[in-house]
């Protein structure tokens, strides 16, 4: 299995990552990728950049080091209504958007029912392309419902390599990811592989994700970023809404 674009990476702008856009693009090129999504943390994440950074992303070349860049963000899901920390107008201007649950930013109840509702509502947003790391047991979710609604709304579910690292701070990620993949396989819902890289050496490194995919015999045709063109065709961004 070959992955042509890493869909979840962070630069210095996120505040707790360690490389520039150019350094990340250079690393992606050296690893043989065709594309790279830069998805720095949105404004409610402590330590991240000001909203001006995202409003000015139009100045960033979309070709760098022979790599096609998708400039976007990792949004924070804020509550059960699925609200995120960017306006629709700003989201429309980006190339890609991940929406994730971060306990320090989520203000709703962290019950299985309420977290599931938050994800379902966030996926109704026509500019939310990917749900990031829904494997985190600190925010429990009904996987059957999550997968069904993801397929219905055309939202990609992320297999997050960082979550699956044995040293990850996320709770029960391997078990939860396995359950999500079984449901995606059963319901024929698309996933995407993201490294959640905060340093250039982690780009395109799926050492923890691949064994889980193999364990559940996950079909390659349901992985969106095995091709750059395939990934772009699966994004909500750029489509009429």
Image (cartoon, rainbow, N blue to C red):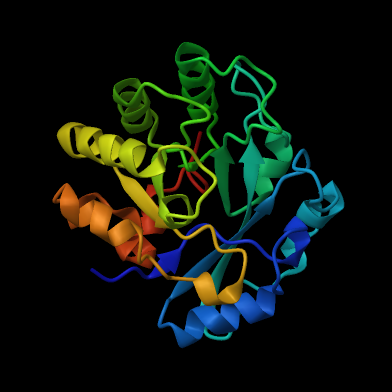
Answer yes or no: is residue 19 visible.
yes
Coordinates of residue 190 in the picture (x, y in percent): 30, 44
Answer yes or no: is residue 218 visible.
no
Q: Report which quarter residue 206 is drawn in.
A: bottom left
Q: Quadrant of the N terminus?
A: bottom left
Image-based side of 109 in relation to 236, left or right: right
Q: Residue at x 17, y 51 (%)?
A: 215
Q: Residue at x 54, y 82 (%)?
A: 27
Of residues 95 and 189, which is closer to you in this image? Answer: 189
Q: Residue at x 17, y 47 (%)?
A: 216
Above-or-below relation of 118 to 63: above
Coordinates of residue 191 in the picture (x, y in percent): 33, 46
Q: Report which quarter residue 150 is drawn in.
A: top left
Coordinates of residue 66 in the picture (x, y in percent): 52, 85
Of residues 95 and 193, which is closer to you in this image? Answer: 193
Image-based side of 144 in relation to 220, left or right: right
Of residues 92 and 67, which is closer to you in this image? Answer: 67
Q: Report which quarter residue 21 is drawn in.
A: bottom right
Count of marks, rendered view: 0
Coordinates of residue 231 in the picture (x, y in percent): 38, 57
Q: Residue at x 51, y 71 (%)?
A: 202
């Amino acid at each position: 299995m070959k992955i042509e674009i890493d869909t979840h990476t962070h630069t210095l702008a996120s505040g707790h990552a360690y490389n520039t856009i150019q350094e990340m693009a250079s690393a992606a090129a050296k690893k043989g990728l065709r594309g790279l999504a830069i998805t720095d943390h949105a404004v409610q994440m402590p330590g991240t950049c000001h909203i001006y950074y995202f409003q000015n992303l139009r100045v960033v070349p979309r070709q760098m080091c022979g790599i096609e860049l998708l400039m976007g963000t990792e949004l924070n899901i804020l509550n059960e209504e699925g609200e995120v920390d960017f306006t629709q107008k700003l989201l429309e201007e980006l190339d890609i958007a991940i929406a994730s649950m971060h306990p320090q930013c989520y203000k709703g109840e962290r019950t299985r029912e309420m977290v599931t509702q938050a994800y379902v509502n966030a996926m109704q947003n026509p500019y939310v392309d990917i749900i990031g790391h829904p494997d985190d047991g600190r925010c429990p979710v009904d996987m059957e419902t999550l997968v069904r609604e993801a397929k219905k709304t055309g939202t990609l579910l992320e297999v997050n390599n960082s979550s699956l690292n044995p040293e990850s701070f996320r709770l029960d990620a391997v078990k939860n990811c396995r359950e999500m993949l079984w449901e995606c396989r059963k319901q024929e819902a698309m996933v995407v592989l993201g490294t959640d890289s905060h340093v250039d050496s982690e780009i395109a490194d799926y050492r923890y994700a691949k064994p889980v995919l193999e364990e559940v015999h996950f079909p390659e045709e349901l992985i969106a970023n095995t091709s750059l063109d395939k990934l772009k065709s699966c994004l909500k961004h750029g489509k009429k809404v």
